[in-house]
Image (cartoon, rainbow, N blue to C red):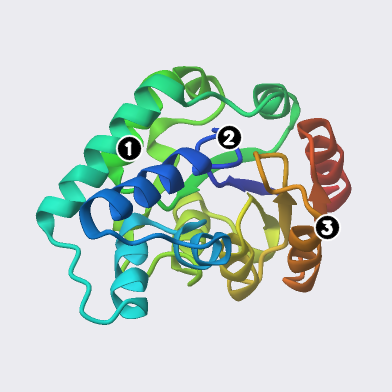
Amino acid sequence: MKKLIIWDFDGVIADSEKLWVSVWVETLQKEKNISLSINEKSDLLVGVADKLRKERLEKYFPGLNLDDDFMEKITEGEIYQGTNFMCPIDGVEEVMSAVKYDQCIATGATKEQHAWKMTQFKWIEKYISPDDYFTADMVERGKPDPDLFLLAAKSKGYLPENCLVIGDSLNDFAAAKAAHMPSIAFVGAEGNDTAEYRRKCAEAGVAAICATMPEVKLSVIKILG
């Protein structure tokens, strides 16, 4: 039976989630004089698209208006950070080259954002066609809703139960669960491999928790057969 691996991008393929969070934290401090605690950063910024970050912040801070000028500064900061500091997760290409299943990417970025990120990741095209990149602006509701993962499965011709999500955020795992897809929690990105985060991943119902890409490879084979 055919199987599909659905990769998240930031924090799984690219060690980049920390970069986007740092842009938001610094821009909020500079432009709005807002400082976020560690828990606030985790709850409001990690693992979601910029659109949802904006919505969460405006809801969390009554009266806060993150207008177009603010969002332009976010985009500028993300492009600078991504262009200068984004790098692949150690060992991820070895996993992509070794697995014998179909693969695609479903990311919380927009199509435009993902395009400039991919300028440094052209090697991925050896394993995943650009036609198989699914972005947040292709669906009405992004993660933690299941729409993006379901779109990826349907577009590729797979039943949800024959898909496996590899993500790094609780929103990935919530979306996978809602889509009736098993998921692997990759905790190898900076700051993720803690006892507390592993506990949250386990509570989210993931099929495996992996701190390295060799562990991911073994878990993929175990789960998909």
Q: Which one is earlier in the sequence, the residue at label 1 or at label 3?
A: 1
What percent of the width, then of the height, locates residue 16?
50, 36
Q: Which one is earlier in the sequence, the residue at label 1 or at label 2?
A: 2
Q: Secondary structure at mark 2?
A: loop
For residue 76, what is the image quadrant?
top left
Q: Tell me the residue at 45%/38% (across/down).
A: 19
C-alpha separation, residue under disc 3 versus residue under disc 2: 22 Å
Q: Secondary structure at mark 3?
A: helix
Q: Which residue is mark 3?
A: 195
Q: Which residue is mark 1?
A: 78
Left or right position of 224 against 170: right
Count of marks placed on residues = 3
User: In the rendered structure, which amino acid carries the disc numbered 3?
Assistant: Ala
User: In the rendered structure, which amino acid carries the disc numbered 2?
Assistant: Ile
What percent of the width, then of the height, locates residue 211?
79, 41
**Up-down relation of residue 53 to residue 108 (above or below):** below
What percent of the width, then of the height, locates residue 88?
57, 25
Q: Are marks 1 and 3 in contact (CB under 8 Å)?
A: no
User: Tag 1: Cα neighbours inside 10 Å, few (<14), some, or many (≥20)?
Assistant: many
- Relative to the observer, which residue lies in front, 212 or 148? 212
Please name which of the two marks, 3 or 2, marks the residue nearer to the observer: 3
C-alpha separation, residue under disc 1 versus residue under disc 3: 29 Å
User: Tag 2: Cα neighbours inside 10 Å, few (<14), some, or many (≥20)?
Assistant: many
- Relative to the observer, which residue lies in front, 138 or 40? 40
Left or right position of 218 against 100: right
Please name which of the two marks, 1 or 2, marks the residue nearer to the observer: 1
- Relative to the observer, which residue lies in front, 48 or 126? 48
User: Tag 3: Cα neighbours inside 10 Å, few (<14), some, or many (≥20)?
Assistant: few
Q: Secondary structure at mark 1?
A: helix
Q: Which residue is mark 2?
A: 13
Q: Tell me the residue at 53%/57% (across/down).
A: 153
